[in-house]
Amino acid sequence: MTPIRDCTPADLPEVVVIEQQSFNHPYPLAVFTKYLRATFLVAELGQRLAGYIIGIKMGDKTLIVSLAVHPLYRRRGVGASLVQRLMERLPSSVTEIQVRPSNAAALGFYPTLGFERKQVIPRYYANGEDAVVMVRRRGPE
Ligand SMILES: CC(C)(COP(=O)(O)OP(=O)(O)OC[C@H]1O[C@@H](n2cnc3c(N)ncnc32)[C@H](O)[C@@H]1OP(=O)(O)O)[C@@H](O)C(=O)NCCC(=O)NCCS
């Protein structure tokens, strides 16, 4: 299991590098600074950060704001561990994420954790791309 802990201000430069390696429209440092007040977790492999996840709770719904794993550390279960830990930290009946239809990795990844496609929001992103809303509903306990 990947070691996962809360993000600190000192982690943010490395988080920004992961972000820039992962997205065409990366969030800037100021956005991450703001999200230090949310649930913001990092996965550590050795001395390096392998990935991060940010989540917020709205009522009985947990929203995954962002998730990224450094390209060098993908397909080792880091992303899955981050999502699992976030769901433990923010237990809700529903966990939700918005994904670009062009993001084949994310569309392959989330179903492995029990997420299903719920709806498409047309022209959700600034470049006019739709968003696919994926949800995971908590099963009976
Ligand atoms: C999506 C992302 C977070 C997955 O992280 P990861 O650490 O590589 O994922 P895991 O190793 O935990 O993958 C678990 C399973 O998800 C599926 N999966 C992961 N990446 C996949 C891909 N590129 N294509 C298809 N399925 C994939 C696989 O079934 C995988 O299990 P396997 O490796 O045994 O086959 C990572 O690719 C990433 O950071 N992408 C860029 C940023 C991004 O798109 N973030 C999500 C925005 S909504």
Image: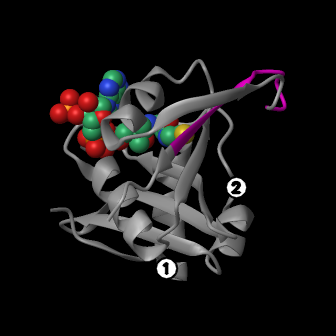
Residue type at numbered disc 1: Ala
| Labels 2 and 1: the sequence-earlier one | 1
Give the residues drawn in magenta, as a range: 125-135
Q: Residue at x 49, y 79 (%)?
A: 10
- Could you tell me if residue 74 is visible in this image? no
Residue 4 drawn above or below residue 26? below
- Could you tell me if residue 39 is visible in this image? yes
Q: In which quarter of the image is the N terminus?
A: bottom left
Residue 133 located within the stretch drawn in magenta: yes
Where is residue 136 shown, x and y percent of the image? Answer: 47, 46
Q: Which residue is drawn at 54% across and 74% down?
A: 39
Residue toward you, 113 or 126? 113
Q: In which quarter of the image is the C terminus?
A: bottom left
Q: Which quadrant of the structure image shows residue 45?
A: bottom left
Q: Name the residue under label 2.
A: 28
Q: Mark 1 points at which residue?
A: 10
What is the distance, in whole Å, between disc 2 and disc 1 at their CAs? 15 Å
Residue 12 drawn above or below residue 97? below
Residue 36 drawn above or below residue 30? below
The reply, left or right, for residue 46 in relation to residue 55 is left
Q: Residue at x 58, y 45 (%)?
A: 97
Dot 1 crowding, Cα within 10 Å, few <14, some 14–19, many 20+: few
Where is residue 114 shown, x and y percent of the image? Answer: 37, 41
Dot 2 crowding, Cα within 10 Å, few <14, some 14–19, many 20+: few
Q: Which quadrant of the structure image shows residue 60?
A: bottom right
Mark 2: which secondary structure? loop
Residue type at numbered disc 2: Pro
The reply, left or right, for residue 81 in relation to residue 105 is left
Q: Is mark 2 within 8 Å of ligand 1?
A: no
